Image (tube, grey):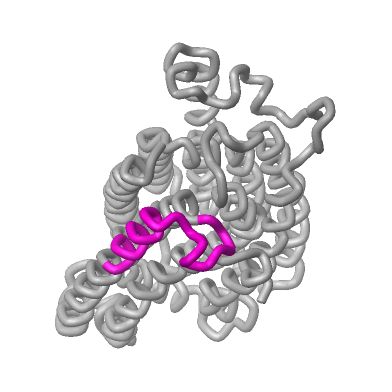
Amino acid sequence: MNSVDKLRNTFTLASCNVLLQVMFRVLTFLLNGFTLRFVSKELIGVVNVRLTLLYSTLVFLSREAFRRACLSGESGTNRNWRQVVNLLWLTLPIGVIWALLLGSVWLWLLEVPDPEAVPYYGAAVVLFAFSGVQELLAEPLWVLAQAHMFVWLKVVAESLAMIAKCSVTVLLVVFAREWGLYIFSAAHLVYTGFLVLCYVVYFTRFLGSEEAEKKSFPLHRVTDLLPGRIRGEPLIDWSAAQLTWSFFKQSFLKQILTEGERYIMTFFSVLTFGDQGVYDIVNNLGSMVARFVFLPIEESFYIFFANILERGRDVHRQEQEAASMAAEVLECLLKLVVVIGLIITVFGYGYSHLALDIYGGSLLSSGAGPVLLRCYSCYVLLLAVNGVTECFVFATMSKEEVDK
């Protein structure tokens, strides 16, 4: 696949990811507005801040470094994908270890919510941790799909999973409100279960088919997706494993910085659970554009830059056509996200109070909500530039530069 084809596929992937994120944020936006009218803001705060932080921390620390390392460098049939698959299966035991460690902290070291206001907290911690481990079962399939540009697989899988999650949440909120945190735990298990099921069903049907042969897919049987020793070859791709460790050290710090405010609220109890719920709703509203547009662009073009540029080489040792295309694409992306960021900053700052009043009534618009949303509108401009430049830098840096 030449650079033009890779660019075309990357734009398609980015467009689909944008549409996917729009659907996710709209559904989450409507779901939060709906549940606010049926459950307490304390319950929303525990779910959206504390339990979601447990899940995101577990999943991020278990797989992010593997994703970055295994999607870097050569792609397609040029890599030994059996070794890569073996490496990716390490995410599962690592996820189990993180689940035990983080679950213990969430259960025994953090403040336990009032059982009357927020029932079934202990069971919810266990179920959210289990859902994170469950999602890791699909990690080798996810990386294979991304590396080979199976654009619609991710869109369909995550769309079905999100629709199922929202449907379960709405039904249980309306008809089984007394279940408390069990409502959101069950919905999250359904979400991760649907994700895994979609990937497994697709690859089970795809491997060995005429389409797979036509695309020269490097794996041929379902058993190739499972870990196994390769005769006469190393068990895993050691260069990717070393790069994974470098990315893990960077990812650990990135997770702390990205979710810093949630860690502060969780570990230092600077806000009540009700105030955490209000903050999270405002945060979700303010970050809609960042998640709609900037995050899909960052994820998609990381793959593009990693595929057309050689990691660790300076510009003079790169293929000149690829380097020139990468420079032009980076320039266009920066111009695009800056324009979008400026629009959000201007209109978000002026209409924060009105937006919160329409969405949540006086519960959101009467307190510090409008000030928070105005600050976030300015922050979006910084997110715009940071995401694109970061995806380019980390797609091209050498292992030593990542460590540094």
Taking the spot 57% from the left edge, 26% from the top edge, the residue there is 218
Residue 53, image x and y in percent? Answer: 56, 64
Taking the spot 63% from the left edge, 74% from the top edge, the residue there is 253
Of residue 263 and residue 347, the one placed in the foreground of this image is 347
In the image, residue 285 sits, relative to residue 207, either above or below, namely below
Place residue 115 in its image quadrant: bottom right
Residue 176, image x and y in percent? Answer: 45, 44
Decide if residue 62 is on the left or right side of residue 101. left
Place residue 83 in its image quadrant: top right
Taking the spot 76% from the left edge, 46% from the top edge, the residue there is 93
Range of residues picked out in magenta: 310-331
Taking the spot 42% from the left edge, 65% from the top edge, the residue there is 40
| Residue 32 visible in rendering | no
| Residue 358 visible in rendering | yes
> Could you tell me which quadrant the N terminus lies in?
top left
Of residue 90 and residue 395, the one placed in the foreground of this image is 395
**What predominant SS class does the magenta segment belong to?**
helix
Decide if residue 201 is on the left or right side of residue 15. right
Residue 73, image x and y in percent? Answer: 56, 50
Of residue 50 and residue 201, the one placed in the foreground of this image is 201
Residue 223, image x and y in percent? Answer: 68, 20
